[in-house]
Amino acid sequence: MKAILLEQAGSVENLIAKEIEKPMPGDNEVLVAVKAISVNPVDYKVRANEDVLKMIYGEQKPVVLGWDIAGTVIAVGNKVTQFKIDDRVFGMVNFPGAANAYAELVAAPQDHLAKIPSTVSFEDAAATTLAALTALQVLQPRIKKNDRVLIHSGSGGVGHFAIQIAKSMGAYVITTSSAKNKDFVIALGANEHIDYRAQAFQDVVSDVDFVFDMFNGEILLHSVKVVKDGGSIVSIPTPVFSKEVLDLAKTRNVSISNLMVHSNGNDMNTLKALLENGAVKPHVSQTFPFDEMAKAHQQLEGGRTIGKVIVTL
Protein backbone atom coordinates (compact mmCIF):
# COMPACT_ATOMS: atom_id res chain seq x y z
CA MET A 1 0.00 0.00 0.00
CA LYS A 2 1.04 3.61 -0.42
CA ALA A 3 2.03 5.63 2.65
CA ILE A 4 3.85 8.88 3.34
CA LEU A 5 7.01 8.31 5.35
CA LEU A 6 9.16 10.65 7.38
CA GLU A 7 12.74 9.41 7.63
CA GLN A 8 13.98 12.33 9.72
CA ALA A 9 12.55 15.52 11.20
CA GLY A 10 12.74 18.61 9.04
CA SER A 11 11.04 20.37 6.15
CA VAL A 12 8.12 19.15 4.05
CA GLU A 13 10.61 17.71 1.56
CA ASN A 14 11.16 14.95 4.14
CA LEU A 15 7.63 13.63 3.56
CA ILE A 16 8.15 10.84 1.00
CA ALA A 17 5.47 8.64 -0.59
CA LYS A 18 6.48 4.96 -0.68
CA GLU A 19 4.98 1.50 -0.94
CA ILE A 20 4.99 -0.33 2.41
CA GLU A 21 3.48 -3.54 3.75
CA LYS A 22 -0.18 -3.22 4.65
CA PRO A 23 -1.10 -3.54 8.35
CA MET A 24 -3.14 -6.38 9.79
CA PRO A 25 -5.80 -5.56 12.38
CA GLY A 26 -5.33 -6.89 15.90
CA ASP A 27 -8.09 -8.62 17.85
CA ASN A 28 -9.75 -5.33 18.86
CA GLU A 29 -8.91 -3.40 15.71
CA VAL A 30 -10.52 -2.75 12.36
CA LEU A 31 -8.69 -2.19 9.10
CA VAL A 32 -9.83 1.05 7.50
CA ALA A 33 -9.48 1.92 3.82
CA VAL A 34 -8.81 5.62 4.27
CA LYS A 35 -10.75 8.11 2.17
CA ALA A 36 -9.84 11.34 3.96
CA ILE A 37 -7.22 12.53 6.45
CA SER A 38 -7.37 15.65 8.61
CA VAL A 39 -4.08 17.50 9.03
CA ASN A 40 -3.43 19.45 12.24
CA PRO A 41 -0.76 21.81 13.56
CA VAL A 42 0.57 18.95 15.69
CA ASP A 43 1.38 17.11 12.46
CA TYR A 44 3.83 19.70 11.20
CA LYS A 45 5.23 20.32 14.68
CA VAL A 46 6.09 16.63 15.00
CA ARG A 47 7.43 16.57 11.44
CA ALA A 48 9.70 19.57 12.02
CA ASN A 49 11.06 18.89 15.51
CA GLU A 50 13.29 15.91 16.25
CA ASP A 51 12.67 16.08 20.01
CA VAL A 52 8.89 16.03 19.58
CA LEU A 53 9.20 13.24 17.01
CA LYS A 54 11.17 11.13 19.51
CA MET A 55 8.60 11.76 22.25
CA ILE A 56 5.99 9.94 20.16
CA TYR A 57 7.96 7.45 18.08
CA GLY A 58 11.12 6.92 20.12
CA GLU A 59 14.04 5.86 17.96
CA GLN A 60 11.84 4.38 15.23
CA LYS A 61 12.70 5.53 11.70
CA PRO A 62 11.10 5.99 9.28
CA VAL A 63 7.69 6.84 10.72
CA VAL A 64 4.22 7.43 9.31
CA LEU A 65 2.60 10.55 10.75
CA GLY A 66 -1.07 11.37 11.18
CA TRP A 67 -3.97 10.56 13.51
CA ASP A 68 -7.27 11.72 11.95
CA ILE A 69 -8.99 9.43 9.49
CA ALA A 70 -12.30 8.70 7.81
CA GLY A 71 -12.89 5.67 5.63
CA THR A 72 -14.48 2.26 5.18
CA VAL A 73 -13.92 -0.86 7.26
CA ILE A 74 -12.52 -3.66 5.10
CA ALA A 75 -11.51 -6.16 7.80
CA VAL A 76 -12.22 -6.70 11.51
CA GLY A 77 -10.30 -8.33 14.33
CA ASN A 78 -11.56 -11.43 16.15
CA LYS A 79 -12.92 -9.49 19.14
CA VAL A 80 -14.47 -6.54 17.28
CA THR A 81 -18.15 -6.06 18.14
CA GLN A 82 -18.81 -2.42 17.28
CA PHE A 83 -18.20 -2.46 13.52
CA LYS A 84 -18.54 -4.67 10.50
CA ILE A 85 -17.09 -4.69 6.98
CA ASP A 86 -18.31 -1.78 4.83
CA ASP A 87 -19.10 0.48 7.82
CA ARG A 88 -18.08 4.10 7.24
CA VAL A 89 -16.02 5.19 10.26
CA PHE A 90 -14.07 8.19 11.55
CA GLY A 91 -11.84 8.95 14.48
CA MET A 92 -8.60 10.20 15.96
CA VAL A 93 -6.48 7.06 16.28
CA ASN A 94 -3.95 6.31 19.04
CA PHE A 95 -3.28 9.93 19.96
CA PRO A 96 -0.74 10.83 21.28
CA GLY A 97 0.96 7.60 20.21
CA ALA A 98 1.68 6.28 16.73
CA ALA A 99 -1.34 5.84 14.46
CA ASN A 100 0.35 5.64 11.03
CA ALA A 101 -2.55 7.52 9.45
CA TYR A 102 -0.83 8.94 6.36
CA ALA A 103 -1.59 5.73 4.51
CA GLU A 104 -4.12 3.99 2.30
CA LEU A 105 -4.89 1.48 5.06
CA VAL A 106 -4.90 2.04 8.83
CA ALA A 107 -5.39 -0.50 11.62
CA ALA A 108 -7.41 1.32 14.29
CA PRO A 109 -8.72 0.27 17.73
CA GLN A 110 -12.49 -0.08 17.58
CA ASP A 111 -12.87 2.09 20.70
CA HIS A 112 -11.25 5.07 18.96
CA LEU A 113 -13.84 5.24 16.19
CA ALA A 114 -17.49 6.02 15.50
CA LYS A 115 -19.75 5.43 12.52
CA ILE A 116 -20.06 8.31 10.09
CA PRO A 117 -23.64 9.64 9.84
CA SER A 118 -25.19 8.84 6.48
CA THR A 119 -25.52 12.53 5.58
CA VAL A 120 -21.86 13.36 6.33
CA SER A 121 -19.05 13.14 3.75
CA PHE A 122 -15.71 11.46 4.39
CA GLU A 123 -14.08 14.91 4.22
CA ASP A 124 -16.36 16.44 6.86
CA ALA A 125 -16.04 13.35 9.05
CA ALA A 126 -12.23 13.44 8.90
CA ALA A 127 -12.36 17.12 9.86
CA THR A 128 -14.41 16.34 12.98
CA THR A 129 -11.69 14.48 14.83
CA LEU A 130 -8.68 15.85 16.74
CA ALA A 131 -9.77 19.51 16.67
CA ALA A 132 -13.37 18.69 17.51
CA LEU A 133 -12.35 16.22 20.23
CA THR A 134 -10.10 18.86 21.76
CA ALA A 135 -12.97 21.33 21.92
CA LEU A 136 -15.35 18.71 23.32
CA GLN A 137 -12.95 17.40 25.95
CA VAL A 138 -12.12 20.92 27.12
CA LEU A 139 -15.68 22.25 27.23
CA GLN A 140 -17.94 19.34 28.17
CA PRO A 141 -16.76 18.95 31.80
CA ARG A 142 -16.29 22.66 32.45
CA ILE A 143 -19.12 24.81 31.16
CA LYS A 144 -22.88 24.91 31.62
CA LYS A 145 -25.91 26.72 30.26
CA ASN A 146 -25.68 30.53 30.37
CA ASP A 147 -21.95 30.57 31.19
CA ARG A 148 -20.04 33.42 29.59
CA VAL A 149 -17.28 31.75 27.58
CA LEU A 150 -14.36 33.45 25.81
CA ILE A 151 -12.89 31.39 22.97
CA HIS A 152 -9.70 32.72 21.44
CA SER A 153 -9.04 32.22 17.72
CA GLY A 154 -12.61 31.27 16.96
CA SER A 155 -12.01 30.87 13.23
CA GLY A 156 -9.29 28.22 13.64
CA GLY A 157 -9.57 24.45 13.62
CA VAL A 158 -10.23 23.98 17.34
CA GLY A 159 -11.89 27.36 17.78
CA HIS A 160 -14.60 26.94 15.17
CA PHE A 161 -15.64 23.65 16.76
CA ALA A 162 -15.45 25.16 20.26
CA ILE A 163 -17.91 27.92 19.33
CA GLN A 164 -20.44 25.41 18.04
CA ILE A 165 -20.05 22.98 20.94
CA ALA A 166 -20.29 25.76 23.54
CA LYS A 167 -23.45 27.07 21.87
CA SER A 168 -24.94 23.56 21.84
CA MET A 169 -24.42 23.56 25.61
CA GLY A 170 -26.27 26.84 26.01
CA ALA A 171 -23.30 29.11 26.67
CA TYR A 172 -22.95 32.79 25.77
CA VAL A 173 -19.92 32.84 23.46
CA ILE A 174 -17.42 35.63 22.94
CA THR A 175 -14.64 35.01 20.44
CA THR A 176 -11.62 36.70 18.92
CA SER A 177 -10.50 36.64 15.30
CA SER A 178 -9.49 39.07 12.56
CA ALA A 179 -12.17 41.38 11.19
CA LYS A 180 -12.39 39.45 7.92
CA ASN A 181 -13.60 36.38 9.82
CA LYS A 182 -16.29 38.16 11.85
CA ASP A 183 -19.18 36.96 9.70
CA PHE A 184 -17.81 33.40 9.79
CA VAL A 185 -17.66 33.16 13.59
CA ILE A 186 -21.01 34.88 14.06
CA ALA A 187 -22.56 32.38 11.65
CA LEU A 188 -21.11 29.60 13.81
CA GLY A 189 -23.08 30.98 16.76
CA ALA A 190 -20.77 33.44 18.52
CA ASN A 191 -22.70 36.13 20.40
CA GLU A 192 -19.85 38.63 20.35
CA HIS A 193 -16.83 39.10 18.10
CA ILE A 194 -13.65 40.98 18.94
CA ASP A 195 -11.22 41.99 16.20
CA TYR A 196 -7.94 41.27 17.96
CA ARG A 197 -6.09 43.66 15.65
CA ALA A 198 -8.34 46.61 16.49
CA GLN A 199 -9.16 45.99 20.15
CA ALA A 200 -7.46 44.51 23.18
CA PHE A 201 -9.96 41.91 24.35
CA GLN A 202 -9.15 42.62 28.00
CA ASP A 203 -10.43 46.18 27.53
CA VAL A 204 -13.87 45.11 26.33
CA VAL A 205 -14.52 41.75 28.03
CA SER A 206 -15.16 41.05 31.70
CA ASP A 207 -16.97 38.72 34.08
CA VAL A 208 -16.22 35.58 32.06
CA ASP A 209 -16.83 32.14 33.54
CA PHE A 210 -14.42 30.27 31.28
CA VAL A 211 -11.64 31.01 28.78
CA PHE A 212 -10.45 28.61 26.09
CA ASP A 213 -6.89 29.77 25.36
CA MET A 214 -4.92 28.73 22.28
CA PHE A 215 -1.79 30.85 22.80
CA ASN A 216 -0.35 31.03 26.35
CA GLY A 217 2.04 33.99 26.85
CA GLU A 218 0.59 37.50 26.98
CA ILE A 219 -2.84 36.39 25.79
CA LEU A 220 -3.11 33.94 28.67
CA LEU A 221 -1.97 36.61 31.12
CA HIS A 222 -4.61 39.06 29.89
CA SER A 223 -7.20 36.29 29.88
CA VAL A 224 -6.79 35.86 33.63
CA LYS A 225 -7.85 39.51 34.04
CA VAL A 226 -11.27 38.96 32.44
CA VAL A 227 -12.31 35.84 34.39
CA LYS A 228 -14.65 36.21 37.36
CA ASP A 229 -13.75 35.00 40.83
CA GLY A 230 -13.91 31.21 40.83
CA GLY A 231 -13.75 30.97 37.04
CA SER A 232 -11.35 28.86 35.02
CA ILE A 233 -9.09 28.73 31.96
CA VAL A 234 -7.83 25.84 29.89
CA SER A 235 -4.75 26.66 27.84
CA ILE A 236 -3.85 23.99 25.29
CA PRO A 237 -0.44 24.93 23.79
CA THR A 238 1.76 23.86 26.70
CA PRO A 239 1.46 22.79 30.35
CA VAL A 240 4.11 25.35 31.35
CA PHE A 241 2.76 28.64 32.73
CA SER A 242 4.77 31.68 33.77
CA LYS A 243 5.06 32.72 37.40
CA GLU A 244 3.35 35.98 36.52
CA VAL A 245 0.33 34.13 35.14
CA LEU A 246 0.15 31.74 38.09
CA ASP A 247 0.51 34.54 40.67
CA LEU A 248 -2.22 36.62 39.04
CA ALA A 249 -4.51 33.61 38.78
CA LYS A 250 -4.02 32.86 42.48
CA THR A 251 -4.78 36.46 43.41
CA ARG A 252 -7.96 36.47 41.33
CA ASN A 253 -9.03 32.93 42.36
CA VAL A 254 -8.90 31.65 38.78
CA SER A 255 -7.91 28.07 38.03
CA ILE A 256 -5.63 27.39 35.05
CA SER A 257 -4.97 23.99 33.53
CA ASN A 258 -3.65 22.35 30.40
CA LEU A 259 -5.32 19.55 28.46
CA MET A 260 -3.97 17.13 25.88
CA VAL A 261 -6.65 15.55 23.76
CA HIS A 262 -6.89 11.76 23.87
CA SER A 263 -8.52 9.15 21.65
CA ASN A 264 -11.96 8.21 22.93
CA GLY A 265 -14.71 6.36 21.11
CA ASN A 266 -17.44 7.60 23.45
CA ASP A 267 -16.49 11.18 22.66
CA MET A 268 -16.43 10.33 18.96
CA ASN A 269 -20.00 9.13 19.29
CA THR A 270 -20.90 12.41 20.98
CA LEU A 271 -19.46 14.21 17.96
CA LYS A 272 -21.40 11.85 15.69
CA ALA A 273 -24.62 12.91 17.43
CA LEU A 274 -23.71 16.60 17.11
CA LEU A 275 -23.11 16.11 13.39
CA GLU A 276 -26.39 14.26 13.02
CA ASN A 277 -28.49 16.92 14.74
CA GLY A 278 -26.74 19.78 12.97
CA ALA A 279 -25.26 21.33 16.11
CA VAL A 280 -21.77 20.96 14.64
CA LYS A 281 -20.69 21.42 11.05
CA PRO A 282 -16.99 21.44 10.18
CA HIS A 283 -15.60 24.07 7.85
CA VAL A 284 -13.12 22.59 5.37
CA SER A 285 -11.19 25.49 3.89
CA GLN A 286 -8.90 23.49 1.60
CA THR A 287 -8.59 19.95 0.31
CA PHE A 288 -5.43 18.41 -1.13
CA PRO A 289 -4.83 15.06 -2.85
CA PHE A 290 -2.72 12.52 -0.98
CA ASP A 291 0.38 13.17 -3.08
CA GLU A 292 0.25 16.85 -2.06
CA MET A 293 0.53 16.26 1.69
CA ALA A 294 3.49 18.67 1.76
CA LYS A 295 1.23 21.47 0.50
CA ALA A 296 -1.27 20.69 3.25
CA HIS A 297 1.49 21.08 5.84
CA GLN A 298 2.62 24.35 4.28
CA GLN A 299 -0.92 25.70 4.31
CA LEU A 300 -1.25 25.05 8.03
CA GLU A 301 2.20 26.38 8.83
CA GLY A 302 1.16 29.71 7.31
CA GLY A 303 -1.04 30.20 10.39
CA ARG A 304 -4.03 31.68 8.57
CA THR A 305 -6.19 28.62 7.95
CA ILE A 306 -9.92 29.02 8.53
CA GLY A 307 -11.35 25.80 9.90
CA LYS A 308 -9.72 22.62 8.66
CA VAL A 309 -7.38 21.26 5.96
CA ILE A 310 -8.17 17.82 4.53
CA VAL A 311 -6.18 15.37 2.40
CA THR A 312 -8.13 12.92 0.27
CA LEU A 313 -7.28 9.49 -1.13
Image: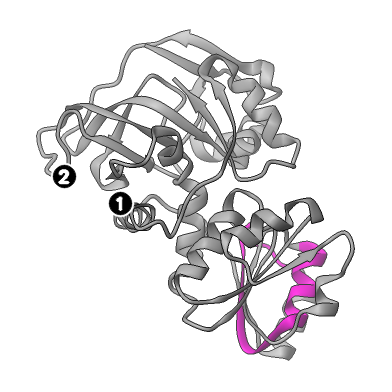
Is residue 238 found left or right of 35 in the rendered image?
right
Sequence-wise, which precedes: disc 1 or disc 2? 2
Disc 2 marks a residue whose amino acid type is Gln
- Taking the magenta stretch, the answer to whether it contains residue 150 is no
Q: Which picture quadrant has residue 218? A: bottom right
Q: Nearer the viewer, residue 149 or 262?
A: 149
Q: Secondary structure at mark 2?
A: loop
How many angstroms separate mark 1 from mark 2 (CA)?
Answer: 10 Å
> Can you say whether 60 is above or below 264 in the image?
above
Q: Is residue 83 left or right of residue 296?
A: left
Residue at image mark 2: 82
In the picture of the structure, the residue carrying the numbered disc 1 is 265
- Crowding at mark 2 (Cα within 10 Å: few <14, some 14-19, many 20+): some
Q: Residue at the location (52% across, 84% down)?
A: 146
| Closest to the observer, 126 or 111 | 126
Disc 1 and disc 2 in contact, CB within 8 angstroms: yes
Q: Residues within 10 Å of mark 1 (few under 14, many from 20)?
A: many
Give the extent of the magenta segment: 217-241
Task: Work out which quarter of the rendered image holds the C terminus and state it.
Answer: top left
Work out whether 140 lies above or below 209.
Answer: above
- Residue located at (14% from left, 39% from top): 80
> How far across and how far down the image is residue 228, in percent?
67, 88
